[in-house]
Amino acid sequence: MSLQVRSESRDGAAVVSPTGEIDLSCSPELRVALQQALLTKPGALLVDLSGVPSIDSSGVATLIEAMRSTQAQSIPLVLCGLVPRVMAVLEIARLDSVFQIAPDVDEALKATGA
Amino acid sequence: MKEAEHCCICSDGAHIRVEVLSQPRYLAGVREMVLAVSRRLGFGESGSNHIALAIDEALANVIRHGYGGASDRPIFLTIAPLVEDGAETGMRVCIEDHARKVDPSKIKSRDLEAVRPGGLGVHIIQEIMDEVEYAPRDDEGMRVTMVKRLSSETEAPAASEGAR
């Protein structure tokens, strides 16, 4: 299954929700979706990964790029809904404490004050 | 297309040997195959997922860095059980390509303190696998051989995992 990416606005935050495995073949699609979401100048950027069963370093690199962009614009970035397999990759990359992580979108919205 | 010379695993009796074109769209299929084989060799869900990720990263490195994104080049993946003292104790993996040769000492994990995109693949491979060795092949290209051992603390026998 190829990656599907849905983007919506919730309480002033941009919520980007990819569905499918994220690897080298589709991480560019996620990158474009995240860049487009930031163009709307949202109050926060939430990446809902609950529909992502696995991710590789190209996907992680895409998330790091998003973090850099949001930091440059002082926009909070929160990852949410991480399944254990995806969380494990962030832990291996020692990025689990670098990203702000929430259990789900609702909690992420609370965390950002949106 | 030139066939790869036999690697150490092949000469010792490869159990699975596949040729994959250097296209990212085939990574998912390889991961599925590796997951299934890992379970059959006794790895649990977590271990199998990790092995699939490590092999995905190694293949992606060949596609991106070895072949520079060229989509018409071959990659050879070989998998066999690791046998030590007459018992199967894990998995051996060999990935070969026809890309340019690289000094193995130049293949390093990046400093993880610097949070930046890129360079994570080598680190992930090294974190997951018990042994990783990069070497130039005799004629052309590179070879990475990897070993992952079953851990009695974390891996259950394949039968109890409902291996598929």
Image: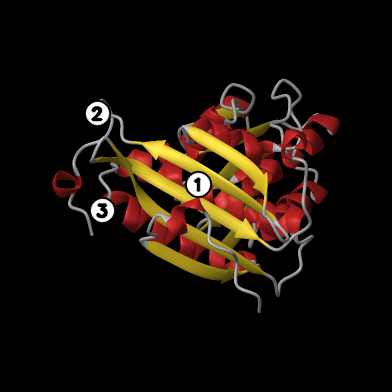
Q: Nearer the viewer, mark 1 or mark 2?
A: 2
Residue position marked by numbered label 1 in the rendering: B53
**Amino acid type shown at disc 2:** Ser
Does any portion of residue A83 appear in the rendered image?
no
Residue position marked by numbered label 3 in the rendering: B40
Q: Quadrant of residue B96?
A: bottom right
Up the image or down, A74 lies above or below A41; here it is above
Q: Quadrant of the N terminus of chain B?
A: bottom right
Residue B142, image x, y percentages: 68, 53
Does any portion of residue B7 appear in the rendered image?
yes
Q: Residue at x 25, y 44 (%)?
A: B42
Q: Residue at x 49, y 51 (%)?
A: B8
Kindly identify which numbered label has been placed on residue B32: none
- Relative placement, left or right, of A90 versus B99 is left
SS class, disc 3 = helix
What crowding class fits label 2: few (fewer than 14 Cα within 10 Å), some (14-19), or many (20 or more)? Answer: few
Residue B161, image x, y percentages: 19, 46
Give the farthest residue toward the bottom: B1
Q: Quadrant of residue A109?
A: top right
